[in-house]
Image: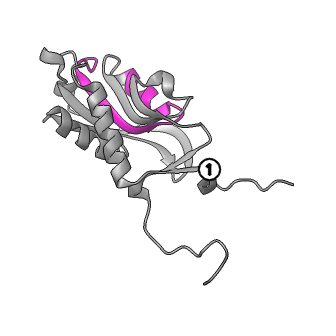
Amino acid sequence: MANPQLPHEKGFHISWDQIHRDSRALAWRLDGRGPMEDGAWKAIVAITRGGMAPAMIIARELGVRLVDTISIKSYDHQSQGEAQVLSRPDPDMMGEDGTGVLIIDDLVDTGKTLEVCRSLYPKAHFATVYAKPKGEPLVDTFITGVSQDTWIFFPWDMALQYVEPYRGKD
């Protein structure tokens, strides 16, 4: 009988350096594509919590000073449930439909979180650093695609610790 894989065995480990490089690449892809003058974006909204680090980097790269968050909870540890909006960005900034707003997340997985955001802000531009196939149709721009069965380990979820050598103790 085959050994079932543990979640960390089909994992994609992202370092702080990697998320920074990939977020900058996303910023470059988005540069000049906004609907405002000279292709600028009116504002950036980070989907908390994972979208906060990429949104900060993208805001810096694109020179966007107006940054807010939307809090949507869809995961309890590693199991996904129904998406629930916990807080929303400033309504004056968002307007009726999110026009000119760039909504950033670290990853689109099944797309549940982005479905909720799109229902609230249908004219916003949705960008993620990483995308899985089920969620790809809901994102406008992303950098790296990963398989649906891969678990992504982000640096804010990890801690450095000693690991025994594969063949045991020295």
Image x and y of residue 151, in percent: 56, 47
Q: Residues within 10 Å of mark 1 (few under 14, many from 20)?
A: few
The color scheme shown is one colour
Q: Which residues are magenta?
A: 96-119
Q: Nearer the viewer, residue 112 or 146?
A: 146
Residue 69 in magenta?
no
**The C terminus: image quadrant:** bottom right
Relative image position of residue 18 (x, y in whole percent): 37, 48
Q: Is residue 14 visible?
A: yes
**Residue 75 at x, y = what percent?**
50, 46
Residue 59 appears left or right of 118: left
- Percent across and percent down for residue 96 are 25, 17
Q: Which residue is mark 1?
A: 10
Above or below residue 45? Residue 158 is below
Q: For residue 91, which quarter of the picture? A: top left
Counting every numbered tag in the picture gives: 1
Secondary structure category for the residue under label 1: helix
Q: Quadrant of the N terminus?
A: bottom right
Please, is residue 134 above or below residue 74 in the view? above
Q: Is residue 105 magenta?
A: yes
**Residue displayed at 25% across by 37% down:** 58
Image side of residue 65 versus residue 49, left or right: left
**Residue 70 seen in the current view:** no
Residue drawn at the location 58% of the way across and 76% of the way down: 164
Amino acid type at circle 1 is Lys
- Residue at 12 percent across and 15 percent down: it is 37
Toward which corner of the image does residue 150 lie, by quadrant? top right
